[in-house]
Image (cartoon, rainbow, N blue to C red):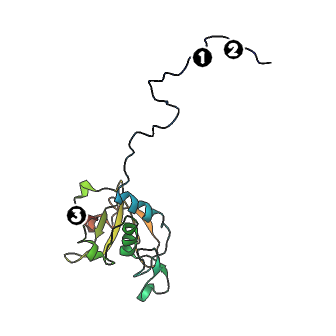
Amino acid sequence: MRTPRVGKPRSRPDTHRPDTRRPDTNRPRAARTKGDTAAIAAAARLGTPFSWGGGTPAGPSRGIGRGAGTIGFDCSGLTLYAWSRAGVRLGHYTGTQFRQGKRIRLSDLRRGDLVFFGGGTGDPTHVGLYLGGGMMIHAPKTGDVVKKTDFLDSPYYRPRYRGAVRPG
C-alpha cells in the first residue's frame, strides 16, 4: 500500500507558460551556413593523405604526377570537395579558387572562407579552409596529411598570407 504524500499538494501546471521540460520546437535555430557545411566536410577528412592533384567533389582520389600512387587530397582538391558538400563548385587550382567568390578582409573571416598563401605577385600557391580562431584545415604537402594549423600564429604561414575568399 502506498504511503500518502505529506505536505503541499501538487498543483496543475500553468497552461499559459510553455512546458520547459521539452525543447522549444517553435524557436528558430541558427541556420547552418554553406561555410559551416564546408568546414564540417573538411574536418571529416582530417588525417587523409596528401596527394598532388588529388580530390574531386566526391572525395579523395588518386592524384597525378608525384601523387599518382596515393589516394587523397591536395590543397585545392580538399577545398573543392568541402565546398561541393555545400553545393558550390570550385575549380581544382588554387589560382582559380582565388578568383571564385567575394574577397574578404582578414578581420571579417568566417568559418568556411578560403585562405590563401604564397605566390608573390602571381597566383597564390596554397589554400586552406578557415575554421575560426585563426585555425585553418588544409592539405599541406607531399608526405603529410590533412590537418589543422593555426595560420595566424604560424611563422611560416602568417607572413605568406595573401587574402581570403568566401565562395558561393
Q: Which residue is mark 1?
A: 10
Q: Is residue 33 left or right of residue 72?
A: left
Report the residue that reaches farthest toward the right.
1
Instruction: Name the secondary structure under disc 3.
Output: strand
- Foreground: 144 or 13? 13
| Point 35% across, 67% down: residue | 128
The first of marks 2 and 3 along the sequence is 2
Instruction: Indicate the position of residue 100 as horizontal and vertical percent values.
Output: 25, 70
Residues under labels 3 and 1: Cα distance? Answer: 60 Å
| Point 30% across, 65% down: residue | 115
Q: Is residue 12 left or right of residue 78?
A: right
In this rendering, the answer to whether 109 lies above or below 42 is above
The first of marks 3 and 1 along the sequence is 1
Q: Within 10 angstroms of label 2, few (less than 14), some, or many (20 or more) residues? A: few
Callout 3, which amino acid? Answer: Lys
Report the residue that reaches farthest toward the front.
15
Instruction: Indicate the position of residue 7 as horizontal and vertical percent values.
Output: 64, 10
Residues under labels 2 and 3: Cα distance? Answer: 67 Å
| Point 21% across, 63% down: residue | 103
- Foreground: 84 or 120? 84
Q: Looking at the image, do the residues carrying marks 2 and 1 touch, with CB atoms under 8 Å apart?
A: yes
Callout 1, which amino acid? Answer: Arg
Instruction: Name the secondary structure under disc 1.
Output: loop
Residue 5, disc = 2
Residue 102, disc = 3
Q: Quadrant of residue 1?
A: top right
Instruction: Indicate the position of residue 56 as horizontal and vertical percent values.
Output: 41, 77
In this rendering, the answer to whether 92 lies above or below 137 is below
Of badges 3 and 1, nearer the viewer stands 1
Instruction: Name the secondary structure under disc 2.
Output: loop
Callout 2, which amino acid? Answer: Arg
Q: Within 10 angstroms of label 3, few (less than 14), some, or many (20 or more) residues? A: few
